Image (tube, rainbow, N blue to C red):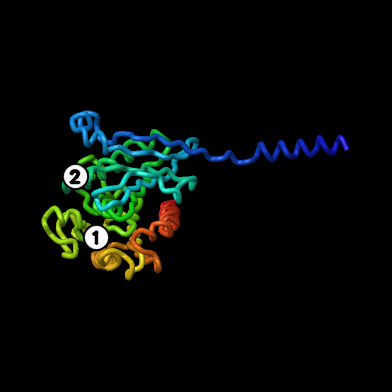
Amino acid sequence: MIKKTILLFIVAGISLFNAKEVTTYKTKENIRYYAESISDSDDYIKERCVLDLYYPEKEKDYETVVWFHGGGLTGGNKFIPESLKEKGVAVVAVNYRLNPKVRAPAYIEDAAAAVAWVFKNIESYGGDPSKIFVSGHSAGGYLTSMVGLDKSWLKKHDIDANSIAGLIPFSGHTITHLTVRKEQNIPEKQPLIDEYAPLFHIRSDAPPLMLITGDRELEMLGRYEENAYLMRMMKVVGHKETTLYELDGFDHVGMAYPAFPLLLKEVKRILEKQKP
């Protein structure tokens, strides 16, 4: 009996010794993504232009999802989506300035500055800068597409937008955002495609683009059809990796929950494709 007990302890010890260490995650909050010289000169930038970094503390070369919250460019706050926690990825949740305190293009400038911060800093936390994905819901989806398709915003930070591993906007405007139209006294039901529209910046060499919307009959103001048109035009100009998912039965807000598994699946697909 004693020998059996000792043997059991030995076997148990071996099992525990060989067990994979549980991944632990750490969160750093309210990191300024503009240089101090900029943040300290503007109280609103100092207040709003911060991000939270959630990352696997002891992992290396992990992928990162930059996440922009929704709220119509007039409200909302940064948060780490529950569906992205403990999935082996880092998440960067971004705050940006809001209307009416600012007008376009301040929102896009902030989004680009935050993405640039991730490219320049994620390696120091263990992440791989070649595995940065950009995503967001509603207004956040709009910012995702603008930063990824119009290369001029990231170029100001010496970052090539094509370095983004993938763009995954959730139910974002592809025409000019309704708040930006309102700033120009254009009604929300009057579509516009100008320099502040992702559709204006279609190009064949953009990063992989996964568009996700809710049910076309439940979405906001033709949001599905906007995204369908962006998909079609991206294909027309020769982009090889644009896909569109319509989540039947889900409205503009509710579509986010079932969209997160698609995001993670797309991250995995792209990384598998990158392997030599």
Taking depth in this image into account, of 35 and 48 the one nearest to the observer is 48
Side (left or right) of 8 relative to 92:
right
Taking depth in this image into account, of 73 and 261 the one nearest to the observer is 73
Q: Badge 1 is on which residue?
A: 174
Vertical arrangement, residue 200 with respect to residue 60, above or below: below
The spot of residue 117 in percent (x, y) is 30, 38
Sequence-wise first label, 1 or 2: 2
- Is the Cβ of the residue at disc 1 closer than 8 Å to that at disc 2? no
Q: Residue at x 26, y 43 (%)?
A: 96
Taking depth in this image into account, of 29 and 198 the one nearest to the observer is 29
Q: Residues within 10 Å of mark 1 (few under 14, many from 20)?
A: many
Which mark is on residue 106? 2
Q: Residue at x 44, y 39 (%)?
A: 55
Q: CA distance from mark 1 to mark 2?
A: 18 Å
Q: Residues within 10 Å of mark 2 (few under 14, many from 20)?
A: some
The spot of residue 218 in percent (x, y) is 33, 67
Q: Residue at x 42, y 45 (%)?
A: 63
Q: Secondary structure at mark 1?
A: loop
Q: Is residue 8 visible?
A: yes
- Residue type at mark 2 is Ala
The spot of residue 24 in percent (x, y) is 51, 38
The spot of residue 158 in percent (x, y) is 23, 40
Q: Is residue 208 visible?
A: no
- Residue type at mark 1 is Thr
